[in-house]
Image (tube, rainbow, N blue to C red):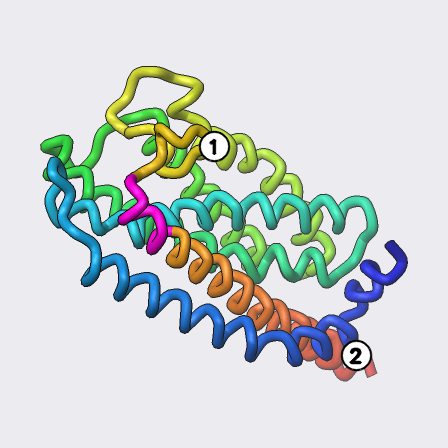
């Protein structure tokens, strides 16, 4: 465990991610482009949904990352609360805009997918509603960081907000299981083979999901590096003003 906490050192984190980032970003591009081309151009139309089903290659991965981005922020926030490692707080801050964008993509593609299937762009379905609330928590989290000048105080308050918002991240994932009513279908991927989409859609979907995960990791690495450097700059400016 001692070796894990070495990466809480900002210098060590930047040095390590500088080596990893090009590989992660390259794999993200390859898997995303490959998965989307495979899914949109080389899979058949569904017998019920037609070509609309191909939105799955954007909707499912973005929804997955919208939820897991918040859960990653939760882990980073808990590390900050317990260990007071600045890199973890800054990583959570860095992930928030990425997660918010993923949530917007999921909401928009879900509406586009849902309109021909449900006959409406929006319904106050349990999963849709909890997902919208999750997006509002993302906005609140980002705004709270911006509103407080002291980084440590901002990290403390946003960590508490992250703990509260995690309830809606869990609801977004399991709302269909909690409530039987609602328009939203069950999970596209499941441990139960009978509930999975057909293999012809499943394989490119897995590639797209891998691409979104790698993209998220690359963006969080890059943004965390930026947050560390910005914090250093603010510290240097504060010292200059005092001197």
- Does 228 sit left or right of 29 as displayed? right
What range is drawn magenta here?
198-205
Q: Is residue 105 above or below residue 123?
A: below
Image spot of residue 6 (x, y percent): 84, 65
**From the viewer's perspective, is residue 86 above or below residue 183?**
below
Residue 107 placement (x, y as % from top left): 30, 45
Residue denoted by label 2: 239
The residue carrying mark 1 is: 191
Where residue 36 appears, x then y in whole percent? 29, 62
Residue shown at 50% from the left, 36% from the top: 169
Q: Earlier in the sequence, mark 1 or mark 2?
A: 1
Q: Is residue 56 left or right of residue 101?
A: left
Side of 56 where 62 appears, left or right = right
Q: Residue at x 15, y 42 (%)?
A: 46
Our reading of the magenta stretch's main secondary structure is: helix
* Residue 83 coordinates in the image, percent (x, y): 83, 50
Q: Was residue 184 drawn as part of the magenta stretch in this picture?
A: no
Give the residue at the far right of this rendering.
Answer: 2
Q: Residue at x 71, y 80 (%)?
A: 237
- How far apart in space, not on screen, are marks 1 and 2 (Cα)? 55 Å
- Label 2, secondary structure: give it: helix
| Quarter placement of the C terminus | bottom right
At x 54% / y 31%, what residue is drawn? 167
The mark closer to the camera, 1 or 2, is 1
The image quadrant of residue 88 is: bottom right
Q: Circle 1 — which element?
A: loop
């Amino acid at each position: 465990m001692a070796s894990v906490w070495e990466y809480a050192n900002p210098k060590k984190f930047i040095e390590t991610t500088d080596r990893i980032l090009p590989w992660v970003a390259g794999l993200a591009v390859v898997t995303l482009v490959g998965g989307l081309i495979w899914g949109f151009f080389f899979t058949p139309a569904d017998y019920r949904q037609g070509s609309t089903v191909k939105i799955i290659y954007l909707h499912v991965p973005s929804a997955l990352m919208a939820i897991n981005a918040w859960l990653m922020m939760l882990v980073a926030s808990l590390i900050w609360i317990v260990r007071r490692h600045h890199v973890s707080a800054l990583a959570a801050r860095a992930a928030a805009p990425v997660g918010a964008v993923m949530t917007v993509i999921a909401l928009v593609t879900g509406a586009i997918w849902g309109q021909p299937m449900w006959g409406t762009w929006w319904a106050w379905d349990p999963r849709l509603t909890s997902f919208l609330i999750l997006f509002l928590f993302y906005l609140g989290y980002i705004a709270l960081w911006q509103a407080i000048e002291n980084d440590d105080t901002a990290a403390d308050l946003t960590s508490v907000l992250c703990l509260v918002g995690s309830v809606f991240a869990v609801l977004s994932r399991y709302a269909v299981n909690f409530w039987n009513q609602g328009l939203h279908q069950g999970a596209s991927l499941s441990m139960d083979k009978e509930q999975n989409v057909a293999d012809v859609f499943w394989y490119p979907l897995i590639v797209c999901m891998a691409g979104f995960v790698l993209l998220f990791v690359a963006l969080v690495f890059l943004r965390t590096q930026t947050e560390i450097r910005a914090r250093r700059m603010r510290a240097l400016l504060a010292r200059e003003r005092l001197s």
